[in-house]
Amino acid sequence: MKRFGFTMIELVFVLVIIGILAAIAIPKLAATRDDAQIAKGRSDVAAIRAAIVSERQARLLQGNTRYINQLHAGNAGNKTVLFENNGTAANVLLQYGIATRDSSNGHWDDTVAQNGNNWDYVYRIVGTDITFTYNRTNGTFACDNVGNTKAEQLCRKLVD
C-alpha cells in the first residue's frame, strides 16, 4: 500500500521546528529594524553636520563669518522636507533635503520650532523623540546626550 500523506508525528515535528525558528527570528527582525533606524539617523546627522560646515566654508571664502541662519525653508511650523535650504533660494544646504513624517519611527518629524536663537528638529526612533538643536551662533547641531533617559541614550547612539 502506498502512502500519499504525512504522518501525524511528521507534522508535529515540522510545527515544532517552525515554532522554534519563529521564536528566534522575530525578535532578531525587530532589533534589526531598530538598528536600521539608528543607522539612518546617524547618516542623516552626519550629512547635516557636513553640510553646515561646507556652507560655513563657502561663506568664509566670501568674507561672511556668520553661520547659516536656519536649516529649513521659511518660518517655524510644519514642513514636508527639511534641510533643503536655509530659507533663501540662493543657499542650498542638502541637494535633495530629507522628507518628514509626523510621529513616524525612523524619520524626522514635520514640525520645526524656534527656541530663542536656536532651531529645534525632532528625529523619532523606537517610539522616542530626540530633539536636535541647531545653534546658529556657533553652528552646532546636537542633541542632549548627557543623562540616562531613553532619549539621551538614543541620542548617544545617533551622534557618538
Image (cartoon, grey):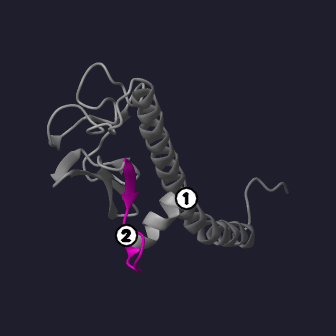
Q: Earlier in the sequence, mark 2 or mark 1?
A: 1
In the displayed structure image, the side of residue 78 where residue 19 appears, left or right: right
Q: Look at the numbered disc 2 and give the secondary structure of its residue.
A: helix
Q: Which mark is residue 151?
A: 2
Q: Residue furthest bottom?
A: 148
The three-letter code of the residue at mark 2 reads Ala
Q: Write down the residue under mark 1.
A: 35
Image spot of residue 147 (x, y percent): 40, 79
Magenta span contains residue 141:
yes
Image spot of residue 66 (x, y percent): 32, 38
Image spot of residue 6 (x, y percent): 73, 61
Image spot of residue 140 (x, y percent): 39, 52
Q: Residue furthest front?
A: 63
Magenta span contains residue 131:
no
Q: Residue at x 33, y 24 (%)?
A: 91
Q: Residue furthest right?
A: 1
The three-letter code of the residue at mark 1 reads Asp
Question: Start and end of the magenta stretch?
Answer: 139-150
Binning the other alpha carbons within 10 Å of mark 1 as few (below 14), some (14 to 19) or many (20 upward) gives some
- Distance from Cα at disc 2 to Cα at disc 1: 15 Å
In the displayed structure image, the side of residue 119 where residue 124 appears, left or right: right
Given residues 138 and 114, the one toward you in this image is 138
Q: Which mark is residue 123?
A: none
- Total marks shown come to 2
Q: Look at the numbered disc 1 and give the secondary structure of its residue.
A: helix
Give the quadrant of residue 88.
Answer: top left
Q: Residue at x 45, y 72 (%)?
A: 153
Query: Considering only vertical position in the picture, is 89 above or below 87?
Result: above
Rendered-image quadrant of the C terminus: bottom right
Rendered-image quadrant of the N terminus: bottom right
In the displayed structure image, the side of residue 117 where residue 21 appears, left or right: right
